[in-house]
Amino acid sequence: MKGISKVVSFDGPPDPDKIKPGQAGVNLVWLTELAENPPPKNKHWPGMIRDMVMHPRRDGTAPTNDEMAAKLGVFRDTVARAKKRWQKIGVIYRVNYNGAYAYSPKMLIVKDEKGNVIKLPSIDVRVASELEAHH
């Protein structure tokens, strides 16, 4: 699946009103902070998080483990471990049990071709209630 053609950067949580249809808005401050402060023994962390956030898929989900592993030349298990950490800190959340993740609206907001903000449901009840409070 082809990704979003343009990602607009913000100095904080993305503003949906400033994102055009078919584009995404990213919290560049938070992304930079996470990329520049990787956990110990995680040499692939900066490249993985930047690639995942700056190349969202058109349906609002993060690239799959296989897509990221092939692009970055790492094992898919390395990507899976990183995604679990990003889930714990609130960058992404699980959409289903097949490995699909979507972005926290504090990190990235994706608009479809009609200009609607893509809001994907979470399988985690706690995250779902936080998303409802944010939207």
Image (tube, rainbow, N blue to C red):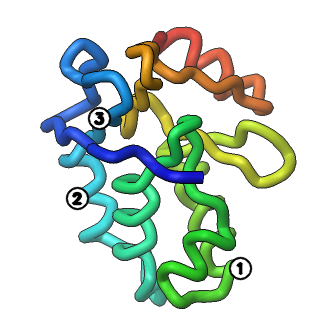
Q: Which residue is mark 3?
A: 25
Residue 125, numbered label: none
Badge 1, how many Cα within 10 Å: few under 14, some, many 20+?
few
Residue 76: which quarter of the image? bottom right
Depth order, front residue of 20/94: 20
Per the model, the C-alpha gap separating discs 2 and 1 is 24 Å
Asked whether residue 59 is in view, the answer is: yes
Q: Secondary structure at mark 2?
A: helix
| Residue sitting at x 56%, y 71% | 68
**Left or right: 95 in relation to 88:** right
Amino acid at circle 2: Thr
| Residue sitting at x 58%, y 61% | 85
Q: Residue furthest left?
A: 11
| Residue sitting at x 77%, y 54% | 99
Depth order, front residue of 52/129: 52
Amino acid at circle 1: Asp
Badge 3, how many Cα within 10 Å: few under 14, some, many 20+?
many
Amino acid at circle 3: Gly
Residue 77, numbered label: 1
| Residue sitting at x 71%, y 48% | 100
Residue 32, numbered label: 2
